[in-house]
Amino acid sequence: MNIFSFTFRRVLYFLPVILLVNLLTFFLFFVLNPPDMMAKKILGDKNVTPEAIEKWKRDHSYHLPRVFNSEEQGFSKITQTIFVQKSARLLKFDFGKSDRNNLDIGKEIRHRMVPSLTITVPMLFLSLIVCISTALIVAFYRATYVDLWALVLCVFMMSISMLFYIIGGQFIFGKLLKLFPISGYESGIYSWKFVFLPVVVGVISGIGASVRFYRTIFLEEINKDYIRTARSKGVSERVILFKHCLKNAMIPLLTNIVMSIPFLFMGSFLLEIFFGIPGLGNFTIEAIDSQDFAIVRSMVFLGSLLYIVGLILTDISYTLVDPRIRFK
Amino acid sequence: MFLLTAKTWPESIQYNYPLQNTIAAVVFLAIVYFVYNSVKNERGRDIWRYIFRRKLAAISFFILCFFVMVGIADSFKWRDPLLDETGNISKDLRGEIIYQNDALSILDRVCTGIRTNNEKTYSAPVSDHQFTKDLIQNEKGESVWRQEKLNYPGRHVLGTDVVGRDVLYICLKGIRTALIIGGFTTMISIPIALVLGIIAGYFGRWPDVSVQFVYSTIGSIPFVLIAAAYILIQGASIFNLCLIMGITGWTSLCRLLRGETLKTRELDYVQGAIALGSGRIRILFRHIVPNIFHLVLITSVLGFSHLVLAEAVLSYLKIGVGQSTYSWGNMINQANLELAREPIVWWNLLGAFIFMMALVLPVNLFGDTLRDALDPKMRGQK
Amino acid sequence: MLFGQTSCTPNHPYPKSERAQPIFYSVYTEPPKHLDPAISYSSDEYAFLELVYEPPFQYHFLKRPYELEPLTATNIPVAEYYDDEGRLLSADVDMEQVEKVVYTIKIKEGIKYQNHPCFVKTEWPDEILNGVDRITDFHEVATRELKAIDYVNQIKRLADSRLPCPILPIMAKYIDGLDTFAGALVKDLEAERRRRSEEQGAAYNREQDERVNPIHLDLNAQPFPGVKLIDDYTYQIILKRPYPQILYWLAMPFFAPMPQEAIDFFEQGILRDKGITIDRYPLGTGPYRIEKYDPNLEYVFVANENFHDEYYPSTGEEGDREKGLLVDAGKKLPFLDKIIFKKEKESIPLWNKFLQGYYDTSGISKDSFGQAIQISTHGNVEASEFLKDRNISLLTSVSPSTMYVAFNMSDPVVGGYTEEQRNLRQAFSIAIDMEEYIQIFANGRGTSSQSPLPPGIFGYEKGKAGMNPVAYYWDEKSQNAKRREIDEARKLLAEAGYPNGKYKDGRPLEITFVNSWYSPALGPRIIWFEKQFKKLGVVMKNETSDYNRFREKIDQGSYQFTMWGWNADYPDPENFLFLLYGPNSREKYKGENTSNYDNPEFNRLFKKMETMPSGPERLEIIRKMKNILHKDSPWVGGLNPVAYGLFHEWYSNAKPNAMYRGALKFKRVDHVLREKKRKEWNQPRFWPVVLVVILLGLGTVPAIITIRRRGKATA
């Protein structure tokens, strides 16, 4: 089976997932926020009468039944419902407008994606380089004091909440050294100076857990029989570590990397809030907070799509790294 | 809405102290039994010997034991009878004893000193003055700003928080929360991930597809949405948080294990075993599970640490353990505002951080040694 | 080239082009939901709207207590009262006889709108519209003179159910025929929608359809007796009954002018589909016009070239001259060329950037009372040494808002009007120590309230006269109101039937606190409340739920006590006392009376006080009402937050005006001094970075060496 038909079949497999996710989100959200409450939240605190709520619902089509309209005739029984009017058209990539302030969601996502990516992509690559090389060094020095201190340091770094990396980073680089703006964003070429600090903070905050994780993977490989054989044949430790070990640890590495693809697009919400970056990261969180169903369903839809793309890519990459795994 | 009025099951656990005590007792006995069991056979003793030969691992083990003891001591609680003015036990009209509203745990009773020495508001560690200035009228009737003296000067090792509670006490109370969140959640998510991951990776075909179907569905709905909906229905409590994190948290490990299993299955000796006609189950347990077990162990250890730490971020998103629960996460989130003060209030954060480190570091050290101990190949090397 | 911009202050967050201009930088935490003057109803949004829209009146920038002055109108109109036969009545007539009230508003001539494409033509060719992304993309712009009909138009727009206007229910109570007019518009709308639905059948998706094909509602097709156009510069508002507070409403953007051209222009399907709407791109006659709309990053407003002549006031409150607030007297407004609102969600970065000189002021006005503290200074009323070093000054102002602890009067235990039930609440009003609350949670930024009226509102009284005698006593020595001792509360509690906080049979009294304080930062407040009740031996149970469930509990009146806040719409005692007016009960009528208080005597006095002019007679009635409240204690304590604002030395004409958020046209920034100070304060330090890099580099050397050595050893 070649790679294309394999991919095609995977996509077919996952179509029901997208539908199911769409439906689940729909119900979950309405458990959280019945239309009455959405109306109240959106209309504000002052002078909200039941008529105003009713009016808002009518005007945003939330007065319709959720999935089945028994009052309508024929095909309209299905179409004149909240689900079809609002959620189903996502399948055409028509995201519609946000409930809260009529933003064009598709446009919004396109605009917000760029700042998110300018942070997450460098962050991913930098942290891969830093963490894998550190983990290799730590694995090289396994069972010595370097290993122990690396462990203590990693745990120390893990124990600090992301919040304080951010506050600390802003304090040191922005306030003490005055090298970078504390927060803000500017599109275009000058974005680098706003992006630098979040990227550095993001990389540093992730070092602890990642190094621990990669070290375990490498150690596992080091103790495989083929490495022992190689070692007994006199292959140098350096070659063993950087060539054989790294190559064979590729599968968990790849899974990890590909799994982070949705997060690349979705951004990191803490970083974005604190550094004032207009990305996608806090889009979903803010929408859930302000009960904007239109945004939530679009983001969930997009998230599930990316997740599935990630899954398919993982499977393909497995076969590329290790030809023994066949397309099935 | 019926959801509002219905008493949810975690709520009934929350105020059902005999049940809670029973659960705590079962957990305690299970731990004791497990340890006893592992000492009984030769291989178990071997592992323990290996661990205790390493100083750091041994120390870690005892620190963990201490934490577990504190956690368990904090889980046994009962209510004292309410006393009236004369000091007698008050009884209602039918002659039944009236109990106090709050139940106290063994830990609370041991720590009565630091539990009740409340101040008005912030005070720095071991300070004898209040941290903030109050507008006080002096003898002449003028208003002056002054730092008032504390009720218990110098008695707060880690200072007091915004409403004057002792930070050390709050930290100690946070241990139970952390252990439950880390332990309970891991206990739910790891088995699911292990079973489903292996099934998907090993059997392929429709089991693989259906497992992938389940985890891609769960994985692609934002956790925040699921958790918020669930917690809304069931109420914000530590058990609910664990449950929902456990049920949704297995997907990434499952993917990882599936990938590993896929790879391991294709290894020559596994293929060889299949060719020789070994039973599928036998192959699973002989060849596959041992080969991926390091991943499970490191993920458990990392997951445990991660969960203890993640609670802070979840509280930031308003889906934490709830206000009334003592937790390090809540402390850290309050510290967010305290750091914006001028001068800053740092001891709350420090307290939470020290305790968090003290739990997470031994878990990692002990976990590493345990992994080495379980892996015969490793042991030979050292 | 990249480094060119970062020459001397690399942490400068603004592009070089902006640095040498009198630009004012402000912040917002949440982007405004609406910028349509008919919808917007929050003080955060008014900070934007009042830059652009000009209702007929405004609040005087300097005078206190707040006073209305004409903005686009020529004078403040006087109400004309008519009886049921249309005869003009004298002003001091009994209000019962009045059947019709007329306000005649005359506007100034020669005021021009900002330049806007809608004045060129209202229907643009599709090819131009397709190439447009923002309102500033139109090359042809024009202006026209402000006419009275624009004001009439806007009042009619308030009835459009698609918006929806939040004050429509209130206005419908007073403006003649507004509710029937609104009903007629709804009917028109429904008819059109039904027509479209039948035309398109099952595939009809209303939202999508109206996005590209907006329904045009003819506002003039239906009769509306509530407003009358007299001539090009005069219009009348006709009320069904006396409501002097309408003048305050007329100073809000709800009553700003809206040209018909703008309505038609923004109803072009292509524009609407692109999100170019009135709700985003306000247009008006004000001192500024919107240039950039980017809710995730910033809003930019620039000075309006066509702004009419308006001058800085030459009179103010006592002491304004000494404070230098009258230096600019008589100069033409506005002073700032540009105003940029930046999104800043977290308080720590905001605070740091303020200290570095990148924001001109700190302190955000927030609608939510939950997070009263954003940035704390020193726990002290004056600015700390560090701030003084940087010449940062502090301004305090009492905001016309109140936060209160409300008991549910329809609850069988804590509510009710019997002597015992009153005693219970009075006991609580002594026990709940709001002074301590303010000290702990607001860093002293507030005053505990003695009545629903905050300082600065007519009817508020200082000292002994305004004291709540139930919870306080007057201390002659310090000339201060002091909280009564807790023993008095215990006595009251015993009289209420709960000796030592217990029922007769010995069970402790349990009171439930309902709140939505999920955020951990608010957790300690719940514990604080617990402590207050513990003083009396009463057990407080906490019920925290998410905001929706919380609102539901309040709306249904199924709670015992909660904390709630109110932000005044206008500086009149009516706007506070109506929070306790029986027919405004939340439980029964979904009004603003959250504690469902209903005292016939209070209600009677309220009706009387409502329409009175502020004078001794009114004060007398308000005193009576306050006495009733003290006795009944439906609110057992509260606080009036004090807003603290810090500003740099280059920012002048800083006088907080809680009623007029758009007062930026009066403000001035000395940008030369600002840039100098920014440079002085933000000299970068490179050496630690260099040092760390060198150290790291050295650190890798031994690692590389050992790897090499080991590699060779095995080889």
Image (cartoon, rainbow, N blue to C red):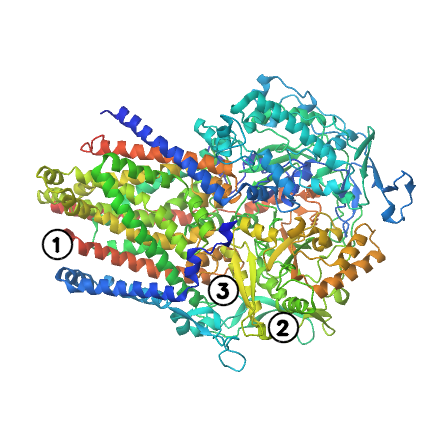
Type of amino acid under label 2: Gly
Q: Which residue is mark 2?
A: C497
Report crowding for label 2: few under 14, some 14 to 19, many 20 or more residues within 10 A (C-alpha).
some
Type of amino acid under label 3: Asp
Q: Residue C218 at what x, y percent from top left?
A: 71, 25
- Secondary element at image label 3: loop
Type of amino acid under label 1: Gly
Q: Residue B2 at what x, y percent from top left?
A: 50, 50
Which residue is nearer to you in this view: A15 or C700?
Answer: A15
Q: Which residue is mark 3?
A: B161
Q: Residue B182 at what x, y percent from top left?
A: 34, 55
Report crowding for label 3: few under 14, some 14 to 19, many 20 or more residues within 10 A (C-alpha).
many
> Which picture quadrant has residue C192?
top right
**CA gap, disc 1 to disc 3?**
51 Å
Query: Residue B190 shows which numbered tag?
Result: none
Q: Which residue is mark 1?
A: B380
- Numbered disc 2: what chain? C
Sequence-first disc among 1 and 3: 3
- Secondary element at image label 1: helix
State whether residue C93 appears in this view: yes
Q: Is residue C429 left or right of residue A88?
A: right
> Which picture quadrant has residue C708?
top left
- Secondary element at image label 2: loop
**CA gap, disc 1 to disc 2?**
78 Å
Position of residue C377 relative to residue C705, above or below, is below
